[in-house]
Image: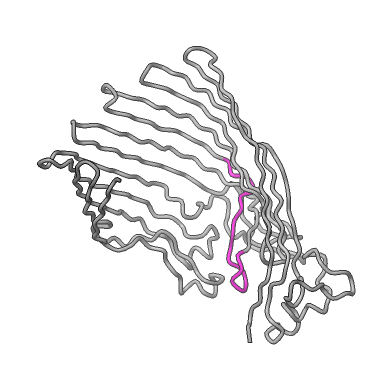
Amino acid sequence: DTIWLTKQDRTDEDYALFGEVYYDITDKLTGTVGARWFKYDNSLEGFFGFSEGYSSSGNSGEALCDKNFGDGIGVGEPGAALPDFQGAPCKNIDQSTDDDDVIWKLNLAYQLTGEALVYATYSEGFRPGGINRRGTIPPYDPDYLYNYELGWKTSWLDDRLRFNGALFYQEWEDFQYSILGPNGLTEVTNAPGNAEIEGLEMDVSWAATEGLGISAGVALINAELDGPYCANLFGGESVSADPCPLDGGASEPPAAPAGTELPVTPDFKATLTGRYEFDLGQLDSHFQVALVYVGDRNTDLRTFENDIVGELPAYTLTNFSFGAGTGNWAVEFFVRNAFNEYAEFSRFAQCPEAKCGPQSYSVVAPPRTFGVKFSQEF
């Protein structure tokens, strides 16, 4: 009476060798070169699909075990039944993917004064490729991020004020994007329409008085598609085109046109924290206020699905705390989310949005919470 059956063995093997060397070109200028070699070998084999009593017209799941599933899943000989797999109805997925590459980091840092440094960095990042749980979807490739960054680190007012920041531009190539496909299985493909990310990040720490410290941070980010994103594969491969070609000669509009904002990425976010430390009799005490602001952002890259699930609204979380202690003990009273903000971190549907989107689920911040913490050192 079980409707859906899954029995799979997955193996992920990752290897890496990395290091960096720096050289003082002058007494103020330092150069750094770093490299990382990586290799991955990921595989997935087993069975997935409906049980025999629920296989639709013999076209899916267990009903296919006595038929040739084809080369798309890497198992089965023409005209032969699919092989057995550890007590499962059969093996209808047997795929693997592997690759190796080298990524780099280059940095120049110049010490303007004893209190100021500027730097330029080029760096690369990656995520390994992998196997989809749905055997008819091909493996996905690694994606790469190319980062160009100019930054500064400064100290002022006899080290009472620190101000750091960075301007950056990033190219995200063949980025891995996951969608919820039929039967609730996540499908990961590479989006060949690359993404571009431009940003500015800054933070400041200020010892305003002997007991009062103020810190703040801000990030402004513009993250969008460089080309159109086609949700459906064409000839088994991801494509970027407008309109998107379909097998059989038809076409459709892109799921996300060029210029679409990347999901869950706000244009603006910021933090502000003030902490006052003082003596309360024989106790070392403090009072702290912390605010976090995150701007609105999309829930999905795809235009149609994003319109169904909706945009995530901006939110501000405010936390208060008061603590005191001496020697090896301390106690702190706190209020988190003091104004009981309904802050949505993410929103999703449990099956494809066209079907389940109207009943979406949200991951939210906990409501206003009062608490006390006690610590003891031994």
The magenta stretch spans residue 184: yes
Q: Determine the residue positioned at 56% across, 22% down.
A: 22
> What scheme was used to colour the molecule?
one colour
Would you say the magenta stretch is mainly helix, strand or loop?
strand
* Image location of residue 43, percent across then percent down: 72, 58
Residue 148, horizontal then vertical, whole percent:
54, 33
- Residue at 49% over, 22% down: 109
Q: Residue furthest right?
A: 79
Residue 208 in magenta? no
Please provide percent x and percent y for residue 26: 51, 12
Task: Give the quarter of the image for residue 335.
Answer: bottom left
Which residue reaches farthest left? 281
Residue 312 or 63: which is nearer the viewer?
63
Q: Answer with left or right where residue 278 lies relative to residue 252.
A: left
Vertical order, 81 against 345 (above or below) = below
Residue 63: image x %, image y %?
A: 76, 81
Q: Quadrant of the N terminus?
A: bottom right
Q: Nearer the viewer, residue 15 or 288?
A: 15
User: Total marks drawn?
Assistant: 0
Residue drawn where x is 59% and y is 59% of the image: 178
Q: Quadrant of residue 218?
A: top left
Viewer-proximal residue, 312 or 109? 109
Q: Which residue range is magenta in the image? A: 171-186
Q: Is residue 301 left or right of residue 208?
A: right
View extreme (top): residue: 26
Q: Quadrant of residue 284?
A: top left
